[in-house]
């Protein structure tokens, strides 16, 4: 009886499209609410550190003194808390994931800081 079931499944499968895609040749279509890696729009960041305080895995480090924003990609769990809490909305979730590797990956982004006008500037 089991042989009839399996042969029916095989015959049905012969006339259907494959359930999988040819990944390297055919790019993956990401869903609308995909949570991928975190990206930052550096010129918009005010280095408030709210994202780092909200991160449950402490994957983010914000240094106002050095004007840097750092993320440890292997600690980040793509929860999206930092994106939700950012007051300037300069963080976003990309629709791709961090490429896997044998070593941890930390991205250090230097944030451009606007010069403040002082009375010594002749103004």
Image (spheres, grey):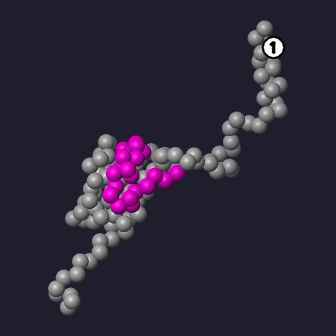
Q: Which residue is mark 1?
A: 4
Q: Position of residue 43 (x, y in %)?
A: 37, 68
- The reply to whether residue 41 is visible in this rendering is yes
Main SS category, magenta section: loop
Compared with 102, 90 (above or below) is below
Residue at position x 19%, y 82% in the image: 118
Is residue 91 within the magenta segment?
yes
On-image quarter of the C terminus: bottom left
The reply to whether residue 74 is visible in this rendering is no
The residue lying at 27 percent from left, 65 percent from top is 67
Q: Is residue 93 above or below residue 79?
A: below
Task: Relative to 49, say whether 13 is above or below.
Answer: above
- Under circle 1, the secondary element is helix
Viewer-closest of 53 and 20: 53
Residue at 79% across, 34% down: 16
Q: Residue furthest left?
A: 119
Crowding around mark 1 (Cα neighbors within 10 Å: few <14, some 14 to 19, many 20+) is: few
**Image: magenta residue range:** 75-95
């Amino acid at each position: 009886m089991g042989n009839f079931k399996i042969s029916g499944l095989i015959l049905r499968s012969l006339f259907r499209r494959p359930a999988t895609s040819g990944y390297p040749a055919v790019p993956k279509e990401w869903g609308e609410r995909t949570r991928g890696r975190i990206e930052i729009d550096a010129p918009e960041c005010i280095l408030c550190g709210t994202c780092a305080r909200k991160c449950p895995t402490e994957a983010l480090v914000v240094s106002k003194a050095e004007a840097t924003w750092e993320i440890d990609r292997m600690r980040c769990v793509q929860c999206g808390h930092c994106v939700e809490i950012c007051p300037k909305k300069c963080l976003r979730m990309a629709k791709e994931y961090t490429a896997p590797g044998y070593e941890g990956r930390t991205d250090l982004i230097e944030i451009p800081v606007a010069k403040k006008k002082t009375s010594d500037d002749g103004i």
